[in-house]
């Protein structure tokens, strides 16, 4: 598995309205792309997700404008 890109996104937690930090990492393995999402809020347990992406989706993620980053959380 190869790490393609890693980024940290400052955000506000929608439930507690506390500042939080989301981390996103894009990996490539023999089956394609895997996006790891992690959000840490001081008042709640860390939320983690793994999402399998097609090549086109991985390119969209890589080319997101800074104000659009974090869109894969929805």
Image (tube, helix red, strand yellow):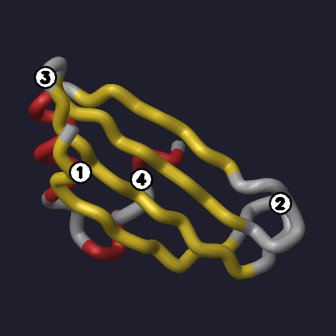
* Numbered tag placed on residue 15 in the rendering: 2
Name the residue beneath numbered marker 3: 30
Determine the secondary structure under disc 4.
Answer: helix
- Cα distance, mark 3 to mark 4? 25 Å
Residue 13, percent across and down?
Answer: 72, 67
Q: Quick one: label 1, few (<14), some, or many (20+) residues within 10 Å?
A: many
Name the residue beneath numbered marker 4: 71
Determine the secondary structure under disc 1.
Answer: helix
The reply to whether the C-beta atoms of the residues labelled 1 and 3 are less than 8 Å apart is no
Determine the secondary structure under disc 3.
Answer: loop
- Residue placed at 81% from the left, 73% from the top? 42
- Cα distance, mark 1 to mark 4? 8 Å
Compare residues 52 and 28 and report the one nearer the observer: 28
Name the residue beneath numbered marker 1: 61
Q: Quick one: label 3, few (<14), some, or many (20+) residues within 10 Å?
A: few
The reply to whether the C-beta atoms of the residues labelled 1 and 2 are less than 8 Å apart is no
22 versus 33 height, above or below: below
The reply to whether the C-beta atoms of the residues labelled 3 and 4 are less than 8 Å apart is no
Compare marks 2 and 4 and give the one earlier in the sequence. Answer: 2
- Residue placed at 68% from the left, 49% from the top? 47
Total numbered circles: 4
23 versus 42 height, above or below: above
- Residue placed at 21% from the left, 37% from the top? 1
Answer left or right for 45 relative to 8: right
Q: Quick one: label 2, few (<14), some, or many (20+) residues within 10 Å?
A: few
């Amino acid at each position: 598995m190869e790490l393609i890109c890693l980024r940290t996104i400052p955000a506000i937690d929608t439930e507690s309205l506390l500042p939080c930090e989301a981390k996103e990492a894009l990996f490539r393995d023999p089956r394609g792309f895997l996006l790891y999402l992690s959000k840490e809020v001081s008042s709640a347990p860390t939320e983690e997700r793994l999402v399998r992406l097609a090549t086109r989706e991985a390119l969209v993620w890589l080319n997101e404008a800074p104000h659009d980053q974090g869109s894969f959380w929805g």
